[in-house]
Amino acid sequence: MQTLFSKIQDWFGNFTVKERITFCKRLSFMVGSGIPIWQSMNLLYSQAAKGRRKTVVGRLLKDISAGHFLYTAFEKHMPELGEYGINIIKVGELSGTLGQNLDYLSAELKKKYELQKKVLSAMFYPAFIVLATFFMVMVLTVYVFPKVLPIFTSLNMGLPLSTRALMYFSKFLISHGVWVFLLLCAIFSTLFIAYRKSLKLRTLFETVWLNLPVVGKIYKYYLISQICRTLGVLLKTGMRLDEALVICRATSASVVYKNSLSLLHRFVVKGGKVSDYFVSQKRLFGGALADMVGVGEASGTLSDTMLYVSDMYETDLEDLAKNLSSALEPALIVLMGLMVGFVAVSIITPIYSVTQKLKP
């Protein structure tokens, strides 16, 4: 699972998530040890394996040697760090805390990576069961059943209802299966394009998704955890709250929460407190978050509070994902048994009836 996740990440950038973590960690160690940035990058370049990654590090080194800021070089040649990572580097470089901020960044990238991996791992087995069931039913219906169907029709005997239903379904798939598949592909492609293009449709979809019983809670906890962690780290690096909220909004994966963070930014700029806004948005953020943020604001430890809340939601999220996986496994196994059993019974019952009528 970890290898698959790394490969998926590799398709979308020059560096996988694990490589970004290692790169930032090594650069943090070197800069924190007092080694100049250009020399640190030169060491990383000499250590990089040949390929496009070495080329990217070489471009970073070239820009830094030419006098460019580190964050502008990263923004140009390593955009997969995202606005969140680049701004952490920018704040560290301008405030003289680059080594510390790079260490923050590597730690947070690692936590995000591990959280995503745990959620995907928890959902992998249920998804595998569903796909395996669908594949087995299709094989039995399209390939196995048609081979014994001529025997049933030649005997001119009354077939059970389940067998007749499977027979009609099998004939339909054989005759129109390709068109059905193409139609489903067209529908899903249209919905996907509309989802990507239409902000209203994305908002509607996410609103429905967030209100689902268990899956919605998992998604909500994931989003809140990411928002709190991003905000906490940015504040810890010395960034102002209003600036941190802008970046937090830009890096959020949810349209619904992006809109809410925009409103929070306006509220804070006008002099409001984050906790007061969270109280008015309990549907999205919950009451416990507002209470803890209120304590953090009152004590002047908002950044630490945000990081603590993020850890708390991550723990709850892991438990929810495990519980969901554990709860779904028996139900999916039963569903798989019923579907495969229905097809098997539909095939075996007529054969059994024929053998009962045969006389030695």
Image: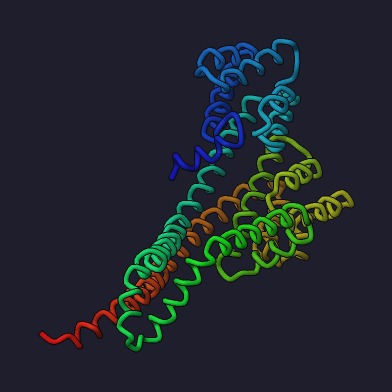
Q: How many marks?
A: 0
Q: From the viewer's side, name the closer residue of 195 and 103.
A: 195
Q: From the viewer's side, name the closer residue of 190 and 115.
A: 190
Q: How is the image coloured?
A: rainbow
Q: Is residue 155 left or right of residue 303?
A: left
Q: From the viewer's side, name the closer residue of 100 and 10.
A: 10
Q: Is residue 348 left or right of residue 103?
A: left
Quarter of image, res 98: top right
Q: Quadrant of the C terminus?
A: bottom left
Q: Against 269, is 333 above or below?
A: below
Instruction: Give me the residue at 55% from left, 38% from top.
Output: 9
Would residue 326 be visible to someone looking at this image? no
Q: Quadrant of the N terminus?
A: top left
Q: Against 205, is 80 above or below?
A: above
Residue furthest toward the left?
Answer: 360
Q: From the viewer's side, name the closer residue of 357 and 130.
A: 357
Would residue 206 be visible to someone looking at this image? yes
Instruction: Give me the residue at 42% from left, 76% from top.
Output: 167
Residue 242: x, y in percent?
Answer: 81, 44
Quarter of image, res 217: bottom right
Residue furthest toward the right?
Answer: 270
Q: Against 160, is 272 above or below?
A: above
Quarter of image, res 246: top right
Q: Is residue 148 left or right of residue 135?
A: left
Instruction: Give me the residue at 75% from left, 37% from top.
Output: 239
Instruction: Give me the residue at 20% from left, 82% from top.
Output: 355
Residue 53: x, y in percent?
Answer: 57, 23
Residue 284: x, y in percent?
Answer: 70, 63
